[in-house]
Amino acid sequence: MRQVLNLEFAQREHIPTTIYTSSDQACARVADAICELITARKAAGKPAVLGLATGSTPVRLYRELIRRHREEGLSFANVIIFNLDEYYGLIPEHPQSYRRFMQEQLFNLVDLKPENCHLPDGDVPREDVLASCHAYEEAITEAGGIDIQILGIGRTGHIGFNEPGSTPDSRTRLITLDSLTRRDAARDFLGEKNVPRHAITMGVATILNARKIFLLAWGEAKAEVIAQAVEGQQTEAIPASFLQKHPDCVFCIDEAAASHLTRVRHPWLVGMVEWSPAMIRKAVLWLSRKTGKPLLKLIEEDYSENGMADLLTEKGSAYELNIEMFNTAQHTITGWPGGKPNADDSHRPERAKPFPKRSLILSPEPLDDIYCMGGTLHRLVNQNNDVTVAYLTSGNLAVPDSEARRVIELMLELGEKRESADDLKFARLLDRKLREKGDFGDDPAEIRQLKGLIRRTESRSSARLLDTDSKRLRFLDLPFYENGRYRSFQPDESDVERLIELLREIRPHQIFATGFGNDPLSVPGLCFEILRSALAASQSEPWVNDCHIWLYRGPGMEWETHEIDMAVPLSPDEFENKIQGIYQHQTQRNQSPNLGKDGDGNTWNLASKFNRATASAYDALGLAEYEAIEAFKRLDINR
């Protein structure tokens, strides 16, 4: 943990914010406060009143509270719960209702009294909504008010479902969900069209009435809005900014979620910094973007007018710094991601030997590999490296029922035409299983298997376009995914062992992976931690010391220029080939998360936007102009 209150680097922050090295550390701190409250209220013969949130963010907090209940005797018998919100129009049994979420994540796993667990009624008739909301406010008041309120934050800046436009005096009410909020929920509902358009939420004023507030945030996807809420003006455009009004509110965030705070992103603007090579590169490339000048055109006044005069004093003239940073950026560019044989590699991101390399590409779900590094994959294959693509999970949870229905209908028709009793029997079984589970049920094993096979066929089709032999595709189907569902995944040693087996078999010279900086409960975040564990367990094996780890960002994200250690440029033809590869993943055309604030309607448009933006960023630095660039950051395997 890094405690930062009252430091000069936090001078721009209007809300006390503590950065933790992991979400588990943050959750332990918040769990301590909850335990202290419960204990003190129990001693006083009074209930402790908690306001709780849903979504992936608080899940680890709930798991820590459950652990303390089971292992340390923490009792919730004197606890009253009020949840922030509920989707409107969902019955409590719906798999995505927040009532069911809370039952599965906390209520059923501790000794809470059912009558003490309150959520807004999402199934109330429309004409009774107002009265139901008033009753919810009254229930909070009758309980004595909320002692501790737990919050997450949405990418629109919403707390609860208080979307942009919510006022600081708002109370519990029915609200229309923002389009970005609905897109972020699309994966859970297997498509944006299935996401409810309305929700009932506590108001901003209701939240501000809590005596103490903890806001939790993990992952870089939340970094921009965290900075806006903490450092910006109070505004209805970012409802979380109204938390600046609260006398006892603390943001508890991980390093990835803190990455856009000024003290992290641009520390030279708020205090003296240690000018390490990485910090110099970060600052000079930022200066180039801010001034709109290529690197070689920056002058000393640009440095001194933007908080970097001490850098010139310590490191020399602008001319020397500009050339050094230009060369550093230029040396990240390579058309040989596996290393160029028989070439001077002193200024190349990847070494020349050995060649060919055994390259292992890890894709958390099918599509991640093509979407984020399809052009690089194509290069690795065509440059005769020994490439293996491993899909860590089947991705079956992201396949809509409509896609499964389409395949089942094809199987039924084929069975009838071939007059195959066995084929018909199996197709009819799948048809019955799909109908029986209905709109709200979890997929039975047979349907999940079918959906996984659908995604395998899409991956093979995509691989063919990129000249990748389908025999080089590996489908690990890690148990944590096959046995779980979103927000409920719990990896264990069996997942790590399965990846260790693959690593020992391939003994890669290169690993391309993603998930660094993601929400720790997301599929990429979990897969990255499984990789960390597998590498740690393999440290004594000779191949590990000769292995480079290259990190690619997930869909809808990209490295900033100062973070890029390898930039692989794509020609127009290569780029179009990649887009066609993405297009083969038919079930995911509008399913992938992080489709962006601009409402990009499909996966290939967003991939195009980010790869072209990286090329434009390099062009703006004064480097060569390319159609598109895929970017990678090298990971220290011991970090």
Image: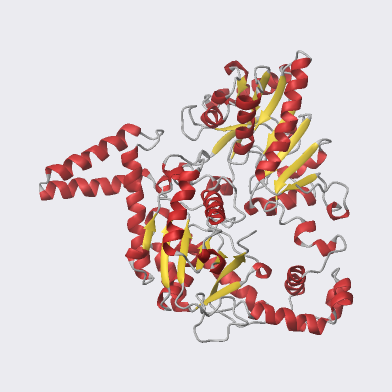
Q: How is the image coloured?
A: secondary structure
Q: In which quadrant of the rendered view does residue 624 lie?
A: bottom right
Rendered residue at 15%/43% (across/down): 422
Position in image of residue 136 (x %, y %): 65, 22
Q: Is 409 or 553 nearer to us in this picture? A: 553
Q: Would you place residue 162 above or below residue 536 in this image?
A: above
Is residue 196 found left or right of 469 in the rendered image?
right
Q: Is 620 or 539 nearer to us in this picture? A: 539
Rendered residue at 39%/33% (across/down): 441
Is residue 313 found left or right of 356 in the rendered image?
right
Q: Looking at the image, how many numbered discs can be counted on the residues?
A: 0
The quarter of the image holding the C terminus is bottom right
Taking the image as drawn, is residue 153 in sight? Answer: no
Position in image of residue 632 (x %, y %): 58, 68
Q: Would you place residue 482 above or below residue 172 in this image?
A: below
Q: Residue furthest left?
A: 419
Position in image of residue 542 (x %, y %): 52, 65
Q: Is 207 or 398 nearer to us in this picture? A: 398
Q: Residue furthest top?
A: 45
Q: Would you place residue 211 above or below residue 473 in this image?
A: above
Taking the image as drawn, is residue 65 in sight? Answer: yes
Rendered residue at 23%/49% (across/down): 410
Position in image of residue 52 (x %, y %): 65, 31
